[in-house]
Image: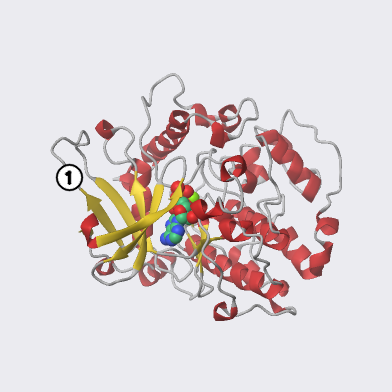
């Protein structure tokens, strides 16, 4: 058997990926270890999703405001959730101004002897950020200027480039997972679905090409899920995160999610409406993907140009590049940062020029909307507990993503146990493939 020629990959500063990682990742010594919850003064809940709770708190040592993300153990006997371990492990390594930093871990021991709970609760401690992007966009009094959108986009792409340069797929890019401070800084958060990938890092002027190995299919919240994933490509690449950036860009321009599908097949339909139905030219091989064989979408050219005309040619071009149906040729984070759009008038604002807004988080958002009615569908990112029996009747159901959503119901509306199972299966599947990553 012929062996593949070894591709020597080069990073932006010309070093090998390994040296780059060592130079750019966070030194171990910067992470001190574990505090007690009593080291923090709790100031109220910020978010309460299907899985997690995020609290606002103040460090009694430094006075800094922080966010505490609770690691929920649904089944104590199963021990510490594998997905949480992965999130913590990845976040501990990362250090970039546009990636949320894990500052500390805090532990809360059961207080009363009568407490049924035996195990301590663990919290991830992160700097407090005033908004998440989805909350900010939900605030009717907030109107983004184009120069401000450019500033956020550049920061988002810088954060994503850092992740991809370090061979990390985020796999849950969406507005709710982007945090924004009143200093105008944007940070990528929620590494609950993130993982290492095997493959080349993005290079200027070079396509991401084909993926090299299989990963689990049930990732990325539906509205931000790229067509190749909806068609069940398993050998995906960092291009899946880039599609999400396109959706987020569109969302910042129009003020609401641009592809709000109600089921996986509806999601694909909305994508074909916007980008045009797939052809051998626009998405070579789409028919051969597991989810493509039985599809014959109505022919249409795509309305992107028309729908985003008012934002000008530069914005339309960038959207087209980020949301290219062919994942092999979709723009990478390096080239997107260099896009013409960012050099056109109005030029991007500097973060400090961005106006300050009233804080907005999941719970605050109920001020503006009935959030319950407005929950985005998700294989929810974040830190989840281990679900029931891994070998039970529904085990492995995520091997076919569409079966997770048989009636076109929102995945977010599935029973929690089923969702947990999804996450558990994904974690187990990958733990089996990459045992070193979860130990
Ligand atoms: N560091 C933080 N500062 C302020 N709010 C935060 C912070 N981290 C998370 N949040 C809020 O909590 C929500 C959920 O956090 P996230 O890490 O995305 O967990 P989940 O897995 O539950 O989605 C975010 O969408 C945001 O509104
Ligand atoms: Mg999240």
Q: How is the image coloured?
A: secondary structure
Q: Is residue 158 shown left or right of residue 389?
A: right
Whether 394 is drawn above or below 182: the answer is: above
Percent across and percent down for residue 276 are: 81, 47
In the picture provided, is 323 more to the left or to the right than 396? right
Q: Residue at x 60, y 69 (%)?
A: 152
Q: Position of residue 409 (x, y in %)?
A: 62, 30
User: Could you say which quadrant of the image residue 55 lies in?
Assistant: bottom left
Q: Position of residue 182 (x, y in %)?
A: 51, 72
57 or 353: nearer the viewer? 57
From this viewpoint, is residue 197 visible?
no
Residue at x 60% of width, y 45% of height: 370
Quadrant where the C terminus lies? top left
Depth order, front residue of 430/211: 430
**Residue in the image at 61% along x and 25% along y:** 406
Q: Residues within 10 Å of mark 1 (few under 14, many from 20)?
A: few
Residue 290 makes an appearance in the image: yes
**Looking at the picture, does residue 421 appear above or below residue 165?**
above
* SS at badge 1: loop
Residue picked out by circle 1: 111
Q: Is residue 432 positioned above or below 105 on the image?
A: above
Q: Is residue 19 left or right of residue 152?
A: left
Q: Is mark 1 within 8 Å of ligand 1?
A: no
Quadrant in the rendering for residue 141: bottom right
Observer-nearest residue: 99 or 1?
99
Direction top: furthest residue: 393
Does 116 sit above or below residue 321? above
| Left or right placement of residue 430 versus residue 181 in this view | left
Taking the spot 27% from the left edge, 72% from the top edge, the residue there is 62
Q: Residue placed farthest to the left in the image?
A: 113
Looking at the rendered structure, the number of numbered marks drawn on it comes to 1
Residue 200 in the image, given as x and y percentages of width and height = 52, 58
């Amino acid at each position: 058997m012929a062996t593949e020629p070894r591709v020597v990959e080069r990073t932006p500063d010309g070093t090998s990926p390994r040296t780059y990682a060592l130079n750019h990742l966070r030194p171990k010594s910067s992470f001190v270890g574990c505090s007690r919850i009593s080291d923090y003064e709790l100031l109220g809940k910020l978010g309460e999703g299907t899985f997690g709770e995020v609290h606002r708190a103040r460090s009694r040592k430094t006075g800094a405001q922080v966010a505490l993300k609770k690691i929920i153990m649904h089944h104590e006997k199963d021990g510490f959730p594998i997905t949480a371990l992965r999130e913590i492990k990845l976040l501990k390594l990362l250090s970039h101004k546009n990636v949320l930093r894990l500052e500390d871990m805090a532990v809360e021991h059961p207080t009363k002897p009568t407490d049924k709970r035996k195990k301590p609760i663990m919290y991830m401690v992160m700097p407090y950020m005033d908004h998440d992007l989805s909350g900010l966009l939900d605030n009717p009094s907030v109107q983004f200027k184009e120069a401000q959108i450019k500033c956020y986009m550049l920061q988002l792409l810088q954060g994503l480039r850092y992740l991809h340069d370090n061979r990390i797929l985020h796999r849950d890019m969406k507005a709710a997972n982007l945090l924004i401070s009143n200093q105008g800084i944007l940070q990528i958060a929620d590494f609950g679905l993130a993982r290492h990938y095997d493959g080349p890092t993005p290079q200027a002027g070079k396509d991401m090409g084909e993926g090299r190995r299989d990963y689990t299919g049930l990732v990325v919240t539906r509205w931000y899920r790229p067509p190749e994933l909806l068609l069940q490509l398993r050998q995906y690449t960092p291009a899946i995160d880039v599609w999400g950036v396109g959706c987020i860009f569109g969302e910042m321009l129009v003020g609401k999610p641009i592809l709000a599908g109600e089921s996986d097949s509806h999601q694909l339909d909305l994508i074909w409406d916007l980008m045009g139905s797939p052809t051998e030219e626009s998405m070579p091989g789409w028919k051969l993907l597991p989810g493509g064989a039985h599809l014959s979408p109505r022919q249409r050219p795509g309305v992107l140009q028309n729908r985003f005309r008012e934002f000008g040619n530069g914005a339309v071009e960038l959207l087209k590049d980020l949301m290219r149906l062919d994942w092999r040729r979709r723009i990478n984070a390096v080239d997107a940062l260099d896009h013409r759009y960012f050099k056109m008038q109005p030029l991007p604002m500097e973060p400090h020029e961005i106006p300050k807004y009233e804080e907005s988080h999941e719970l605050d958002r109920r001020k503006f909307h009935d959030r319950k009615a407005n929950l985005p569908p998700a294989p929810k990112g974040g830190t989840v507990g281990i679900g029931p029996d891994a070998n039970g009747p529904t085990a492995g159901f995520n091997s076919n993503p569409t079966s997770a959503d048989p009636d076109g119901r929102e995945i977010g509306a599935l029973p929690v146990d089923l969702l947990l199972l999804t996450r558990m299966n994904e974690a187990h599947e990958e733990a089996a493939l990459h045992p070193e990553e979860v130990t």
